Image (cartoon, grey):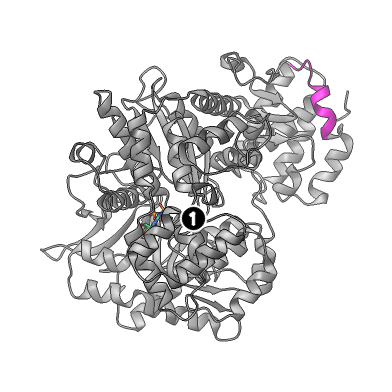
């Protein structure tokens, strides 16, 4: 047995508390384990007390488990050698801990299989699985998520011939639209026929005599009829439309996970998919109950609007259109929050009433919430998860979408490739015969419809995603009009503040002119300052204070009191009674009597219209001024213009996923304040999230 006792470990851990290297809750959990160990001493007690504390501390940083195969915890918890080495030196090495705990009364050893019932795990506070230590609750969440997803993925659904035909029609090349784009592009200075064919005709075939002829035809076609002839001769096997494949996948499976970057058509794809599912339902005499949700109110409102737009552009039969959803809500509201309780109104014993559930911005959904959602799905339901796998993982523990999408690299099964080939006509390259059962439910949309091939934001996002630091440098040098780099030279900070004042000018003029709240929001949503950090002069707290001063000096606001007309705030705590949630944005405006109230944009689920609602400032739960917003909080939102600020010094928070998420919030113009060398370093670092979820999909 180790000469170190649990008490000695606790003593050492207590010394880490003042430096905030551990949270009190982590220490208390270690103490609980030490108390339990005292009652029934066993091999590896001291190691277990330390590991329990680390597992809890890592959970606070978003990791679902403590991996014991690599000495990761001290690094992830930012513990210096002198803080932990002396203690570790006297304990058995972490890779030996699983062996030490083989008979430990506080550690459960579930036998892999996600199919197994995990209900027996309550009797141990900790679980050891595949070299990973879990708090039992999180082990169960992970096992539940895997089990539910695998069950959904295994369920295949027959697609009627009529719906197949409708799908082909929805994805047929629209020669009139292609002709319009062709004429427009050919009138530009740099018409590239091959690029055009890839964007508008989904051409994927390698250059050949046929593609050469197609390009010649595109360059010289003199009429829409001539183009239509050319298109009729284009074989489906030379094309691949990822949106079409996503719909074909989702029609025939109870689970579809559709990942794509900004503007790749996730909503457009779902609009077509839902239309086909409704058509199938009508054919079978039952209109399906469809619910659409997102993790935040803002993301839900955006989903509702985009879906409305996408449906508007589709030619649909009246009965199909009438059955389509028109609003989206939040996940919490769908599940039914019970004030003061962790449990939702809907759970396995009281499942949701729906046939089809669409979850947008799925990357923001953490492991516990995903588990609660999945167990609450009724037996016959279909689930469609939408998101961008490359974005930041959820604020709370887990990286569910990322873990699911890790299976993408396997490619689809040969059977699925054949099935999809039959349904769409495209020629697909299958993966190996053996692979995860989840892989045939995954779809990746690669082509952006928002960013053209020469859009700076699109190119920057791609370079960032591939960690191409050199590529970034070349991009800045090209002088692209929609991206701008501002290194931290002398005077840059002052210039930043001036640009932000300029960015909010229109919004604050609308406030001064007494425009209605909805109109004020229109201007507020056009521009946003995003920061990587909270603290320091480059963080939201420092910048909000400086911006407030500068706006006052410019005569745009009068911040004589805490509350003033034009103050934008972000709610930082849920208040279910008031119906405002963490992340909601409000702006302070006078009402008809001149009293200041804080107005919130409404998602349509809360009211019958999209009009703003207001609350007295004194009633708001915790909130903060939001001229500057953290990139984390900006997930699920997009703005025409974004200024993004990175600090002068590298921080553990600066990772590829953070930068990618921030810069893809911008739709038209991005200005980035950063030292280029720091940016290059940041995009080479990946966010680490330890979990065992992807292992469970094997
Ligand atoms: N196949 C397509 N052909 C032409 N335009 C398309 C196609 N797919 C999407 N678009 C257009 O691209 C834009 C973005 O599409 P959509 O909103 O569906 O993407 P998204 O991935 O949901 O975007 P976001 O990143 O905002 O969530 C829309 O204007 C849409 O009309």
User: Which of the 4 image quadrants contains residue 517?
Assistant: bottom left
Q: Say above or below: 572 vs 147.
A: below
**Residue 482 part of the magenta segment:** no
Quadrant placement of the C terminus: top right
> x, y (%) of residue 67?
73, 36
Q: Say above or below: 471 vs 337.
A: below
Span highlighted in magenta in the image? 94-104
- Give 210 or 289, whichever is nearer the viewer: 210
- Give 497 or 671, whichever is nearer the viewer: 671
**Residue 97 part of the magenta segment:** yes
> x, y (%) of residue 622?
38, 51
- Give 87 or 137, whichever is nearer the viewer: 137
Q: In the image as oriented, which residue stretches furthest toward the left? A: 593
Asked if one can make out residue 557 in the rendered structure from this viewpoint, the answer is: no
Which residue bears the numbered disc 1?
202
Residue sitting at 66 percent across and 53 percent down?
A: 686
Q: Is residue 574 left or right of residue 531?
A: left
Q: Main secondary structure of the magenta part?
A: helix
């Amino acid at each position: 047995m180790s000469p170190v006792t649990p008490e000695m470990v606790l003593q050492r851990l207590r010394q880490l508390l003042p430096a905030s290297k551990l949270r009190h809750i982590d220490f208390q959990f270690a103490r609980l384990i030490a108390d339990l160990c005292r009652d029934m001493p066993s091999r590896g007690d001291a190691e277990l007390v330390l590991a329990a504390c680390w597992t809890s501390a890592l959970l606070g940083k978003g990791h679902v488990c403590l991996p014991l195969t690599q000495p990761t915890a001290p690094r992830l918890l930012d513990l210096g050698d002198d803080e932990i080495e002396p203690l570790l030196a006297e304990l058995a090495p972490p890779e030996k801990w699983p062996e030490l705990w083989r008979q430990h009364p506080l550690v459960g050893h579930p036998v892999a299989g996600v199919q197994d019932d995990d209900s027996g795990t309550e009797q141990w506070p900790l679980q050891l699985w595949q070299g990973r230590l879990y708090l039992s609750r999180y082990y169960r969440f992970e096992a539940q998520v895997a089990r539910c997803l695998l069950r959904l993925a295994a369920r295949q659904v027959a697609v009627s011939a009529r719906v197949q035909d409708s799908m082909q029609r929805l994805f047929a090349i629209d020669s009139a639209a292609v002709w319009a784009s062709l004429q427009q592009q050919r009138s530009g200075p740099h018409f590239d026929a091959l690029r055009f064919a890839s964007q508008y005709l989904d051409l994927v075939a390698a250059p050949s005599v046929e593609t050469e002829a197609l390009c010649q035809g595109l360059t010289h076609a003199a009429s829409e009829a001539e183009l239509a002839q050319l298109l009729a001769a284009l074989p489906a096997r030379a094309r691949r439309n990822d949106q079409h494949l996503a719909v074909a996948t989702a029609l025939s499976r109870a689970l579809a996970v559709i990942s794509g970057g900004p503007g790749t058509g996730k909503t457009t794809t779902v609009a077509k998919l839902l239309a086909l599912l409704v058509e199938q339902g009508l054919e079978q005499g039952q209109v399906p109950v469809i619910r659409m949700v997102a993790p935040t109110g803002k993301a839900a409102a955006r989903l509702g609007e985009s879906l409305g737009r996408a449906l508007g552009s589709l030619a649909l039969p009246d009965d199909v259109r009438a059955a389509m959803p028109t609003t989206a809500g939040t996940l919490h509201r769908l599940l039914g929050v019970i004030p003061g309780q962790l449990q939702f109104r809907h759970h396995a014993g009281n499942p949701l009433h729906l046939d089809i559930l669409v979850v947008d911005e799925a990357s923001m959904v953490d492991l516990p919430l995903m588990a609660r959602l999945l167990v609450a799905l009724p037996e016959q339901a279909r689930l469609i998860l939408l998101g961008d796998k490359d974005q930041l993982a959820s604020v709370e523990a887990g990286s569910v979408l990322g873990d699911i999408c890790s299976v993408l690299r396997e490619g689809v099964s040969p059977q699925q490739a054949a099935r999809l080939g039959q349904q769409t006509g495209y020629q697909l390259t299958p993966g190996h015969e053996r692979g995860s059962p989840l892989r045939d439910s995954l779809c990746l949309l690669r082509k952006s419809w928002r960013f053209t091939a020469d859009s700076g934001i699109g190119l920057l996002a791609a370079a960032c995603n591939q960690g191409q630091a050199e590529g970034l440098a070349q991009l800045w040098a090209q002088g692209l009009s929609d991206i701008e780099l501002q290194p931290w030279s002398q005077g840059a900070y002052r210039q930043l503040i001036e640009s932000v004042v300029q960015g909010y000018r229109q919004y604050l003029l609308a406030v001064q002119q007494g425009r209605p709240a909805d109109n004020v929001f229109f201007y507020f949503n056009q521009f946003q300052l995003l920061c990587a950090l909270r603290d320091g002069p480059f963080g939201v707290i420092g910048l909000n204070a400086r911006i407030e001063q500068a706006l006052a000096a410019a005569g745009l606001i009068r911040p004589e009191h805490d509350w003033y007309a034009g103050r934008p705030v972000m709610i930082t705590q849920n208040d279910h009674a008031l119906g405002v949630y963490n992340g909601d944005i409000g702006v302070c405006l006078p009402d008809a009597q001149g009293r200041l109230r804080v107005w919130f944009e409404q998602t349509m689920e809360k009211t019958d219209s999209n009009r703003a609602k207001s609350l007295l400032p004194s009633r708001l739960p915790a909130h903060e001024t939001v001229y500057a917003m953290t990139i984390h909080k900006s997930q699920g939102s997009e703005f025409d213009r974004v200024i993004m600020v990175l600090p002068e010094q590298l921080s553990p928070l600066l990772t590829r996923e953070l930068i990618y998420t921030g810069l893809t919030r911008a739709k038209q113009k991005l200005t980035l304040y950063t030292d280029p060398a720091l940016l290059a370093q940041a995009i080479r670092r990946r966010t680490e999230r330890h979990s065992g979820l992807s292992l469970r999909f094997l």
